[in-house]
Image: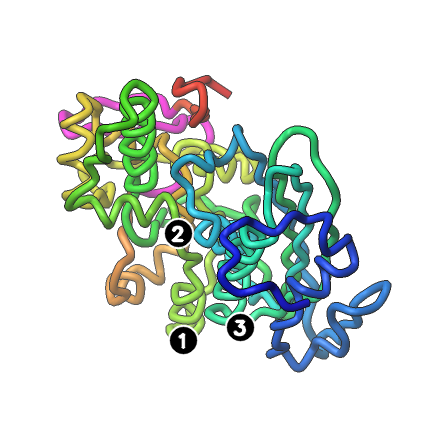
């Protein structure tokens, strides 16, 4: 369907109808994976898994007003992020994502142009991570935008890394830096409150591009999976950091029936995260431990791989696995052992709740 030029009015979804909308949004899909035999356009996609591999499947939902706020989240960024958070789960299993499906529940206030912008972000992520969009669904919603993405990947048989196989004396490693996404969220929420009080005031986000991007356009760490394989390192346990370092290390410890000791001085925190946290009168360590949405990888490796890990750029060894009787603790810079507590962050209510 061709839209009239110089028409500044948004195109209503009803003008295309369900099938016309799906055709319009998916017309630019390009398949990249040899395992994708048939994608969008029939009752189901056809996938031919690689011989000797196992299939990985992960699904996440993003709900407007719970996981994102459209007041400060560009739809293109949202589409990109919706894909990335699912791909991150596949990488966390030591696998490679191959296909995704995207399903939306859309309110009548959304226009065709808005959904085009969202799908532009989806397809940008598909292109960057070499995955195929092979299906999904679109329906109406009375409660804002709801997004459900399913990622399908594969891992060589016997090479999947789970969270329940960490061993005593293993090293605990994380990629990248922590807490940046959380502080990016704090900035956006602050500016939202100021805007709601006075819409004449322009946002003050200068010089904070890094932490804003960490929140609005995170990346999945496919490069870490590639590098680990190149160095012959097979993690003993692994997760992605979506709910915060505290939550993830406790998941690993509980599943593996072990304890852990993390060291505050070893936590990788970007200087911008530190200064921004201090501006908000927040402890940077608390932000790194409990912030969430970093989508970095936390993994454990045998102590025998210590030298190999040290050679990896962008990896910090932050502690080690202990026996379960030793507890799960953070050793502060002052040498005090503090029990690690899992906390969840509610970005809308702006408060922490112990899980």
According to the image, what is the colour scheme of the structure?
rainbow
Which residue in the protein does label 2 denote? 218
Displayed quadrant of residue 203: top left
The x, y position of residue 268, in whole percent, is 23, 45
Which class describes the residues within 10 Å of circle 1: few (<14), some (14-19), or many (20+)?
few
Asked if disc 1 and disc 3 are in contact, CB closer than 8 Å, the reply is no
Q: Magenta region: which residues?
A: 319-340
Label 2 Cα neighbours within 10 Å, binned few <14 / some 14-19 / many ≥20? many
Q: Is residue 93 visible?
A: no
Q: Is residue 84 above or below residue 128?
A: above
Disc 3 target residue: 130
Q: Percent x, y for residue 138?
A: 73, 49
- The residue positioned 48% from the left and 49% from the top of the image is 75
Q: Is residue 102 left or right of residue 125?
A: right
Residue under label 1, please give it: 230
Nearer the viewer's eye, disc 2 or disc 1?
2
Q: CA distance from mark 1 to mark 3?
A: 20 Å
**Secondary structure under the numbered disc 1 in the rendered image:** helix
């Amino acid at each position: 369907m061709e839209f009239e030029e110089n028409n500044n009015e948004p195109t209503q979804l009803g003008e295309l109808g369900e099938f016309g909308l799906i055709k319009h949004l998916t017309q630019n899909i390009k398949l990249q994976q040899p395992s994708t035999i048939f994608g969008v356009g029939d009752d189901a996609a056809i996938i031919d898994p690689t011989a000797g591999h196992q299939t990985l499947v992960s699904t996440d939902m993003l709900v407007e007003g719970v996981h994102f706020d459209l007041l400060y989240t560009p739809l293109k960024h949202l589409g990109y992020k919706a894909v990335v958070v699912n791909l991150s789960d596949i990488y966390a299993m030591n696998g490679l994502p191959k296909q995704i499906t995207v399903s939306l529940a859309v309110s009548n206030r959304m226009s065709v142009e808005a959904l085009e912008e969202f799908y532009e972000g989806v397809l940008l992520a598909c292109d960057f991570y070499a995955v195929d969009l092979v299906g999904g669904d679109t329906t109406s919603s009375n409660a804002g935008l709801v997004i459900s993405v399913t990622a399908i990947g594969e891992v060589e048989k016997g090479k999947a890394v789970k969270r329940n196989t960490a061993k005593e004396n293993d090293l605990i490693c994380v990629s990248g830096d922590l807490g940046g996404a959380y502080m990016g969220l704090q900035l956006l929420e602050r500016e939202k409150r100021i805007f709601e009080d006075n819409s004449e005031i322009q946002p003050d986000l200068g010089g904070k591009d890094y932490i804003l991007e960490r929140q609005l356009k995170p990346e999945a760490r496919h490069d870490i999976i590639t590098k680990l394989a190149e160095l012959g390192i097979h993690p003993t346990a692994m997760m992605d950091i979506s709910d915060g370092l505290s939550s993830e290390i406790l998941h690993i410890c509980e599943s593996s029936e072990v304890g852990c000791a993390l060291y505050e001085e070893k936590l990788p925190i970007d200087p911008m995260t530190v200064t921004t946290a201090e501006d908000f009168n927040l402890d940077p360590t608390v932000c790194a431990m409990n912030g969430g949405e970093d989508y970095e990888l936390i993994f454990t490796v045998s102590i025998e791989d210590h030298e190999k890990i040290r050679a990896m750029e962008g990896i910090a060894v932050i502690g080690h696995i202990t026996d379960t009787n030793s507890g799960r603790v953070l050793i502060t810079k002052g040498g005090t052992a503090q029990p690690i507590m899992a906390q969840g962050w509610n970005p809308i209510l702006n408060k922490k709740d112990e899980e």
